[in-house]
Amino acid sequence: MAYSTAQARKIAEQIHSRFGRKIANACQGTPVPPAFLAGLVGVEAGKDRNGQLKEDATRFEPHVFAALKAVRDGQRRSYSRITRAQIQDSSDAALRALATSYGLCQVMGWHCINSLDCSIAELRDPDKHLRYAVNLLLLNASGGDFERAEYAGEFRQWNTGSESGKTYHADYVANAGAVMAAYRELPTISAAPATAEPSAEAETVSSFPPAQPPESATSAADTSPAPPVENAPQGHQAPAPAPPETGVIQSAGKVVVEAARSQTAKEKAWAWLTGGGFLAVLNYFEERPALVLAAGVVAGLLIYHFTARIRQKSQQAHELTKLKADINTDKSRLDVEVVKQ
């Protein structure tokens, strides 16, 4: 249901009086306007029976739990860049924690693995939650996203994962905008000293490289029950950013590059051709170590075979040229001797 002007102002005033300082602290030093974060809270936070926003609101997403469980059990390759290697030791309770959204901004727990350098317990902490929400906003933002006059695309992306996605509630974007506009009319609240909040330097998130995930989801997940909250909207579904190539893939690429630098033009072509195929195979089979190893051996043999043949032919051609030169030299000497006689 769409908020009336009076409803939007009432919600904005509650956010301002109860969470205004936390919002200012979370947005300090970032391009995210406090009014935008307030608008997000206005449509994401769960409410109690008296209409009070709940900082400890949670919402369990069964479809996310099913997807994560399928990944853990080897029935699905990945979910939002989460692979089996990251959650194979996780219990059902840990997966439920990852499949639950938390707090005023309803951030999904699975963001703790690849996107946020925090545990579920930290994500649920009312003194840290909004800062993690801002970090996630920045992680998914493009240049200039928070310099616009309106933020319909950003609100839509938070709820659906796409700036053109269909929101869970039809009035989601309009209601968020109404609360944001009402919040702008309220007195500005200054941020507290930086020491009062989690270190911005420690929590700043960048796409490359992403924050290192915990050893397993079990260590990141707070396995305490997370009961659904009445009226809590759908949790944030923004996709996690793609992680860069690491480990074996990165090493293989480096080997190919280094090899290509020291080879002839033909050898470079073969190196890039076979090396590129090798990397593609590795990327496809990234969750199957045995196949990755086999692909590595085959690619290595191919590179060695073709480059060795090219080198051999090149050497033979060089020796033949040298032999012809020697013959021509001997012939010239012979001709000189004949003339002298």
Image (tube, rainbow, N blue to C red):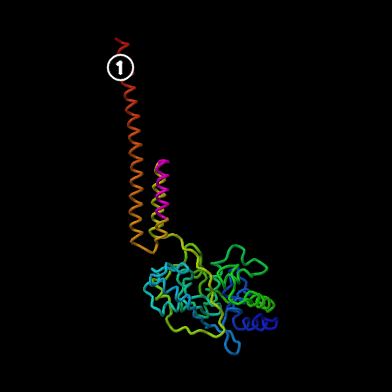
Q: Is residue 87 above or below residue 279?
A: below
- Residue holding disc 1: 334
Residue at 68% from the left image edge and 68% from the top image edge = 149
- The range drawn in magenta is 264-279
Q: Residue furthest bottom?
A: 50
Q: Is residue 282 above or below residue 312?
A: below
Residue 279 appearing in the image: yes
Q: Position of residue 341 (x, y in %)?
A: 29, 9
Three-letter code, disc 1: Leu
Q: Position of residue 262 (x, y in %)?
A: 39, 44
Residue at 33% from the left image edge and 18% from the top image edge = 332
**Along the horizontal axis of the image, is 277 left or right of 2?**
left
Q: Position of residue 141 (x, y in %)?
A: 57, 66
The dominant secondary structure in magenta is helix
Residue at 48% from the left image edge and 63% from the top image edge = 242
For residue 106, which quarter of the picture? bottom right
**Along the horizontal axis of the image, is 340 left or right of 3?**
left
Examine the structure image and report whether residue 269 is included in the region drawn in magenta.
yes
For residue 217, which quarter of the picture? bottom left
